[in-house]
Amino acid sequence: MKFCLNRFLHTILIFLGICILNFFLFHLGPGDPTNMYFGPKTKRANLQNMRHQIGVDQPWSAQFRMWGTKALDGDLGTSWAKHRPVVDILAEAIPATLQLAALALVMNMILGGLIGVLSGIYPERRFGKVLDFVSLSIYSIPTFWLALVLILVFSLKLQWLPSSQMTSFLATDLGFLDRTWDRVLHLILPVTVLGLGGAAATARYVRSHMQEVLQQEYIRLARAKGLSSKRIYLRHALRNALIPVATLLGIYLPVLLSGAFIVEVIFAWPGMGRVAYEAIFAKDYPVIMAVNLIAATMVILGNLVSDLLYRLLDPRIQWT
Amino acid sequence: MATLALLVIAVVGASWIAPQDPNAQISPALNRYLPPSTTHWFGTDQFGRDVFSRVLYGGRLSLFIAFSVVCGSLLVGTLYGAISGYVGGILDQVLMRLADIFLAFPIIFLAVSCMALFGSGLFFLIVVLISTGWMDIARLVRAEVQSIKRREFVLRARSAGLTTSRILLRHVIPNVTGIIVTAAIIRVADIILLESALSFLGLGVQPPTASWGSIVNDGRTVLASAWWVAAFPGMAIVVTILSLHLTAENFQFLKKSFQEA
């Protein structure tokens, strides 16, 4: 009980902190959204009017208070660049990012877990070493470069897969099955880029943890008892080694958001990363604040999930 | 580790090795997008600049940025973590919550927002990258300091009446160096990745200055026809990061065998 209360307070504090930090950061920078309307014939009075309408001519604390109270009511404001309610923009973008991120996470966990476990169990054998080197190499590849290389090979040279957007140009004319297949084709490259990078990191983490677990005394006892290797690995080592993977889930939730940022920009994927990118360059405060709100929520949720899972899965950890 | 040494030498000695001035545009109309050949080992880009020279000079810039960022992060992180861990109590809680807030922020957003606001001078880039990286080191140092501060030599120093700052600077921090070296090497790799990602997005190093990320960005639009512009800097990044990680692992191994001896 005390744990829950503590965590709750902690969460609120961090949430507030992130919102304030965000707001502060954006108001520190020079310029404001009216800059894009500035031209040789623009009248100063019009710009002032615009500023007053949006509310940027008021002191920071007042602006933050206004935004905060409206946000609590569920009104995240209107985008200054696109002149649409922010909620609409987000409602369109979030499912797109979710598709990408969820699939990438699944690929990440499965592939990474598999490779990590295998290379952890057989570190002296050749294929264990090869797996380890491969995962290290993929870990060293920058996401944007991996994306470009895959686009080069699979889209441009082999012409197997499309290289951008979620759907092809005339896809709406096709039947349901064809449309779905089109979607799948478009998903393959971005998901692979996101998933591979994450899988490499997970594999390394799982490998080192697996090696730690295999040094433990209870494994030695199991061997002394005469249990077959397979039984040892499956029943005893695996379960213990995979506990931190559950906590990795918590770390990956926010990371997928920022990883998807680059991938979405390269693949012109209409998701949250793209929305954030455009908003930052247009100095579109309502959208930026809303995106950061979501990012902060993901981070906090991720932390919470990983903490909870860790305490649930490992009976040695106390609940305080 | 040998690869890393080779790389560092190649990059630092760039001004002697590089066959051409990386920013010189020698008859661009004639030399645009030449494929790799004996005169231009990595080919040329859209302005006829030799990509090999650009990669070398870009490597210099990227490594310089990475090292200065890591030095800055080490400075900030070590002091922060040491003070927080040693003093403890409310100050520790407050400092750690503050670090949590920074840590909880997705790095790319923080870096992108700062760059979009404060412009793209080299100094700002380094400051922004430092602000994304010091938290991990601070946490490591704090954990280590908390265990060190119960050790005998610290208790003796305290009973002898040394001031806290003296204890911290002369006794505690030198004992933390072992832990942070490995973290620092890995951090260099991370910063190279982050800086190249930012330059790729156009928010880091600005053209015409070469940096691995910005060269990849240059090559992005001509991927189908001139793949070499984007491919080679990327390979350079991969090799560098790989050698950094291997060095860090070797270092861990050496440290362990040292301690056991």
Image (cartoon, coloured by chain):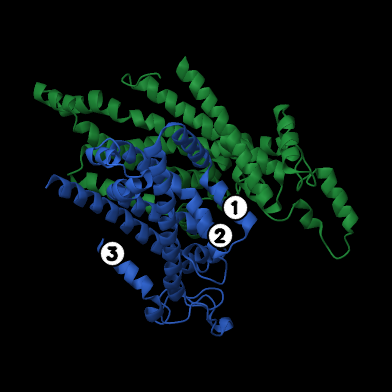
Chain colours: A green, B blue
Asked if residue A211 lies left or right of residue A27, the reply is left
> What count of labels does the image hold?
3
Query: What's the mark number on residue B3?
Result: 3
Q: Nearer the viewer, residue A227 or A28?
A: A28
Q: Is residue B61 above or below residue A177?
A: below
The residue shown at (41%, 79%) is: B15
Q: Quadrant of residue A58?
A: top right
Q: Position of residue B223 (x, y in %)?
A: 52, 63
Q: Which residue is mark 1?
A: B114
Disc 2 packing (10 Å; few <14; some 14–19; many ≥20): some
State whether discs 1 and 3 lie on one chain: yes
State whether discs 3 and 2 lie on one chain: yes
Q: Earlier in the sequence, mark 2 or mark 1?
A: 1
Asked if residue B61 lies left or right of residue A231, the reply is right
Q: Chain of mark 3?
A: B
Three-letter residue code for mark 3: Thr
Q: Chain of mark 2?
A: B
Query: What's the mark number on residue B124?
Result: 2
Question: In which quadrant is the N terminus of chain B drawn?
Answer: bottom left
Disc 3 to disc 2, C-alpha distance: 31 Å
